[in-house]
Amino acid sequence: MLDDVHFVLSHTTHPGNIGAAARALKTMGLEHLRLVNPKHFPSAEATRRASRADDILQRTEVFDAIQPAIAEHKLIVGTSARSRTLPWPMLEPRELAQKIAKDPTQRPVAILFGTENSGLTNEELSLCHYHVCIPTNPDYSSLNVASAIQLIAYELRLAALDENLLKTDHPVIDDEGELPASGEQVEQMFEHWQQVMTSTGFFKPIKPKMIQMRFRRLFNKAALTDSEVRLMRGFLASIKKFNSEEG
Amino acid sequence: MLDDVHFVLSHTTHPGNIGAAARALKTMGLEHLRLVNPKHFPSAEATRRASRADDILQRTEVFDAIQPAIAEHKLIVGTSARSRTLPWPMLEPRELAQKIAKDPTQRPVAILFGTENSGLTNEELSLCHYHVCIPTNPDYSSLNVASAIQLIAYELRLAALDENLLKTDHPVIDDEGELPASGEQVEQMFEHWQQVMTSTGFFKPIKPKMIQMRFRRLFNKAALTDSEVRLMRGFLASIKKFNSEEG
């Protein structure tokens, strides 16, 4: 799906934004950039801002009018601030991404971005099936063009991940070989803890049952791994040893 | 909710990124930016890249260490690439935003961003309850720091909009009316813990940095309440007292 999306930048003024756009696309696994009458391209500034995404710039196609840049697309979408003279079907970026992910007949897709100062012209917007509007702060909606590209590319990537892979939960516990501690391990740790608390005298002043319960809750919230249990026991053992050395 | 989120940038090298960060925040209705040892600030380049978001820069607070910048926060989150030596509880940006939107007891929140080249240090990451990882292209995950800020700010805005519209259920508050411990409380507890580990000799045999990190991870997973911090400190104090009585 991500291979079926073209980002089309019309009349971009600052080459730095073209470079930043390439970088934004590549971080999200997108790669098709088209430029319509850019003010400067190619440009050293674009290459610099692209960081190591300059392969995208090398494959960027340049057009001298908008129509040929969107000739083969099934779905054409223009980015726009909310209020326009002519109301148009609107999508938010997340809705757009889901639409593209769920319906292959809508692909290939072109997503148009206008010039930095004033956005897409009314004529360019009229070529689009939908306008997509990023829900910005109404008091300050001045989103940089590369930032707008970053946000839409991000939504496309998430929608693609959702569609392809079942979204995996992130276990609180790691992927690098640590296992949750067994109930028995944790129980032994608590026994050890209790012995230490008894010998340090921490148990005396307050109700011991309550203290135990509170420590249990604390460590259960942490969902200990086996290596963490060993770590805690090492610490507890050091207190005892410390005592017999000093005592 | 958006007013309760601080974006904390540690050791930022390029002032342009600070300006772009301010702009990114303001487009999403966020406004709190903190800097820890920025290479250049204030800077004309930051102001230029901030566009008309320079009011954010004027109110930006600068710190000379990370701890005071996150002292009052209930939830501390660090942005990170996926693979780290020490696995940590992970969230995607969308999950993070929903967590913050749905649970007022988690606020104020600090979200940390590291230096451009290498991100947050392991030490900075160990201060966090969660690491947040933006699902980038595994072959090119080089997200610009201001772009990462843009994406997370966007998710926060959407979650805040959702919450207002949907009228969420009552916040999940701890059964016993307990509040999450602040970053400062937890930090003081760790200092205390470290003193005790040093005096019991637990620190000697193995690498102390690693031990510290592992304890931090364990207790951050537990999301300690203030009364739990007091409980732990009572226990730690009893070890010291035990020592001086016995010794």
Image (tube, coloured by chain):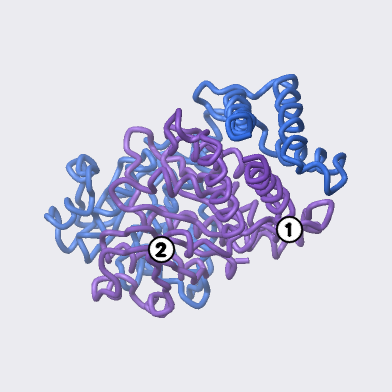
Chain colours: A blue, B purple
Which quarter shows the N terminus of chain A?
A: top left
User: Residue B127: in sight, yes or no?
Assistant: yes
- In-image side of B197 versus A207 (left or right): left
Q: Which of the two residues, A63 or B199, is positioned nearer the viewer here?
A: B199
Mark 1–mark 2 Cα distance, whole angstroms, equals 51 Å
**Which labelled disc corresponds to residue A125?**
2
Q: Name the amino acid, label 1.
A: Leu
Residue B73 x %, y %: 58, 61
Whether A120 is drawn above or below A224: the answer is: below
**Which labelled disc corresponds to residue A172?**
none
As helix, strand or loop, the secondary structure at mark 1 comes to: loop
Question: What residue lies at 71% left-to-right and 63% top-to-bottom?
Answer: B165
Q: Quadrant of residue A79?
A: bottom left
Residue A103 x %, y %: 54, 37
Residue A55 x %, y %: 20, 40
Residue A150 x %, y %: 39, 52
Q: Which of the two residues, A214 or A194, is positioned nearer the viewer here?
A: A194
Which residue position holds label 1?
A: B179
Q: Name the amino acid, label 2.
A: Leu
Q: Chain of mark 1?
A: B
As helix, strand or loop, the secondary structure at mark 2 comes to: helix
- In-image side of B179 versus B139 (left or right): right
Q: Chain of mark 2?
A: A
- Marks 1, 2 in one chain: no
